[in-house]
Image (spheres, helix red, strand yellow):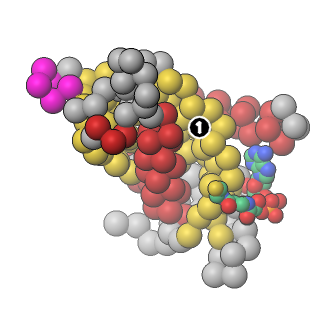
């Protein structure tokens, strides 16, 4: 366990949310799949947990920058989201969430989505507050960190 002000790695902030997809979560297609908003809600919650782990306090979603639905998720599958903080600014954190769907009968697990989000750490008055530094440990951490830095640069430039 780390103290609230300590430097953290992306792995330290990892959060996992998993759930069984139920019939009421399906869309209206002739071959129903899980409604995209259900996945987006799970992604937002999981990514918020990672941002809370990193900052050690309350956070708010500033943006859900990209959510790519690569393939449908079916009712009866388990959805698992794994998210990590991959970049920090002064008060903001970039989080990447990976989405997996698992067929519980066959055990086949697919990577179905990748989502990029930005959260802002808030103090007790609801004002943006500084976040602890992020320690980049692995080549994968470096890769995601550099991608996040470019995405932030583009977003701040209005792109
Ligand atoms: C999040 C919020 C508190 C930020 O307030 P603000 O006055 O814009 O604060 P700032 O201008 O200081 O920006 C805060 C951080 O966001 C970053 N930021 C602002 N616009 C950005 C963008 N388009 N892309 C990425 N980062 C951005 C800033 O760079 C700053 O990060 P930094 O300190 O790491 O550099 C405010 O926008 C808010 O309350 N939004 C509503 C949040 C919400 O309701 N979310 C739920 C949605 S349903």
Indicate the position of residue 111 as horizontal and vertical percent values: 37, 24
Q: For residue 2, what is the image quadrant?
A: bottom left
Single out the residue that lies furthest toward the right.
Answer: 157
Drawn side of residue 44 relative to residue 61, left or right: left
Quadrant of image for the N terminus: bottom left
Q: Is residue 68 left or right of residue 151?
A: left
Residue at the image position 20 percent from the left and 20 percent from the top: 108
Identified at 28% across, 45% down, the residue is 19
Q: Quadrant of residue 33?
A: top left
Q: Between 127 and 14, which is closer to the camera in this rendering?
A: 127
Outermost residue toward the left in this view: 105
In the rendered view, tell whether residue 64 sits above or below residue 128: above
* Residue 35 within the segment the image draws in magenta: no
> Which residue is more in the foreground, 73 or 113?
73
Position of residue 117 in the picture relative to residue 50 (left or right): right
Residue at 50% in and 24% down? 69
127 horizontally vs 18: left or right: right
Does residue 28 sit above or below 10 in this rendering? Answer: above
Residue 21, x across and y down, in percent:
29, 38
Residue range in magenta is: 103-107
Where residue 117 appears, x then y in whole percent?
60, 43
Q: Which residue is mark 1?
A: 116
* Residue 106 painted magenta: yes
Magenta-highlighted stretch: main secondary structure? loop
Report crowding for label 1: few under 14, some 14 to 19, many 20 or more residues within 10 A (C-alpha).
Answer: many
Under circle 1, the secondary element is strand
Q: Position of residue 18 (x, y in %)?
A: 30, 45
Q: Is residue 14 visible?
A: yes
Image quadrant where one finds the C terminus: top right
Residue appearing at x 27%, y 40% in the figure: 22
Q: Residue 17, relative to residue 108: is it above or below?
A: below
């Amino acid at each position: 366990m780390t103290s609230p002000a300590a430097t953290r790695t992306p792995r330290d902030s990892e959060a996992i949310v998993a759930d069984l997809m139920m019939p009421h979560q399906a869309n209206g297609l002739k071959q129903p799949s899980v409604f995209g908003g259900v996945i987006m809600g799970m992604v937002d919650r999981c990514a918020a947990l990672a941002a809370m782990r990193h900052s050690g306090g309350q956070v708010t979603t500033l943006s859900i920058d990209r959510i790519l639905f690569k393939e449908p998720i079916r009712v009866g599958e388990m959805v698992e989201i794994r998210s990590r903080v991959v970049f920090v600014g002064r008060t903001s954190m970039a989080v990447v969430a990976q989405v997996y769907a698992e067929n519980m009968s066959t055990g086949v697990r697919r990577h179905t989505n990748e989502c990029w989000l930005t959260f802002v750490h808030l103090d007790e008055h609801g004002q943006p507050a500084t976040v602890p530094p992020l320690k980049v440990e692995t080549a994968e951490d470096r890769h995601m960190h550099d991608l996040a830095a470019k995405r932030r640069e583009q977003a701040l430039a209005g792109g």
